[in-house]
Image (spheres, rainbow, N blue to C red):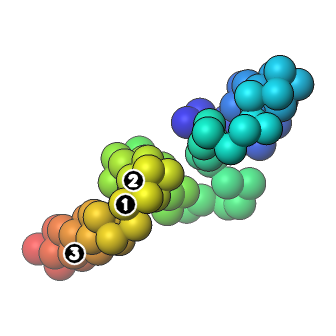
């Protein structure tokens, strides 16, 4: 996870893993998470990370998907979306 763009530290790590053959066996799972290369409206840090898909529930959801817990990942994102929508209404 990095606050950079594609091509940052995560890309260098993935490049090294590929060169070393660590990605060849299928045992290592790697998902880079970066701020997308799109315009994100001004807002609080939380709001901007939410739009970028980099808040806590996005990170945990990605990790759960990597270990085969898709249903838990979906439930987490849905619960977070409900909390967010309730907080913006109040």
Secondary structure at badge 1 equals loop
Query: Which residue sits at x=61%, y=39%?
Result: 27
Which sits earlier in the primary sequence, circle 2 or circle 1? 2
Residue tagged 2: 64
Residue 82 is marked as 3
SS for tag 3?
Answer: helix
For the point 29% across and 64% down, the residue is: 72
Q: Residue at x 16, y 75 (%)?
A: 86
Cα distance in 3D space between marks 2 and 3: 19 Å
Cβ–Cβ under 8 Å for marks 2 and 1: yes
Q: Which quarter of the image is occupied by the N terminus? A: top right
Q: Nearer the viewer, residue 72 or 51?
A: 72
11 lies left or right of 35: right
Quarter of the image where the C terminus is located: bottom left
- Between 36 and 17, the one lying in front of the other is 17
Q: Secondary structure at mark 2?
A: helix
Q: Return the x and y of residue 15 as percentages of the image width and height.
A: 83, 29
Distance from disc 2 to disc 1, alpha carbons, whole Å, reads: 5 Å
Is 74 above or below relative to 28?
below
Q: Is residue 69 visible?
A: yes
Residue indicated by mark 1: 69
- The mark nearer the N terminus, 1 or 3, is 1
Q: Earlier in the sequence, mark 2 or mark 3?
A: 2
Q: Nearer the viewer, mark 2 or mark 3?
A: 2
For disc 3, the neighbor class at 10 Å (few under 14, some 14 to 19, many from 20) is: few
61 left or right of 84 in image: right
């Amino acid at each position: 996870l990095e606050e950079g763009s594609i091509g940052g530290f995560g890309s260098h790590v993935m490049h090294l893993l590929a060169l070393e053959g660590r990605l060849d066996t299928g045992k290592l799972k790697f998902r880079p998470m970066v701020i997308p290369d799109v315009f994100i409206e001004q807002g609080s840090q939380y709001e901007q990370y939410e739009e970028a898909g980099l808040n806590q529930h996005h990170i945990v959801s990605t990790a759960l998907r990597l270990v085969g817990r898709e249903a838990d990942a979906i439930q987490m994102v849905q619960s977070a979306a409900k909390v967010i929508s309730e907080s913006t209404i109040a």
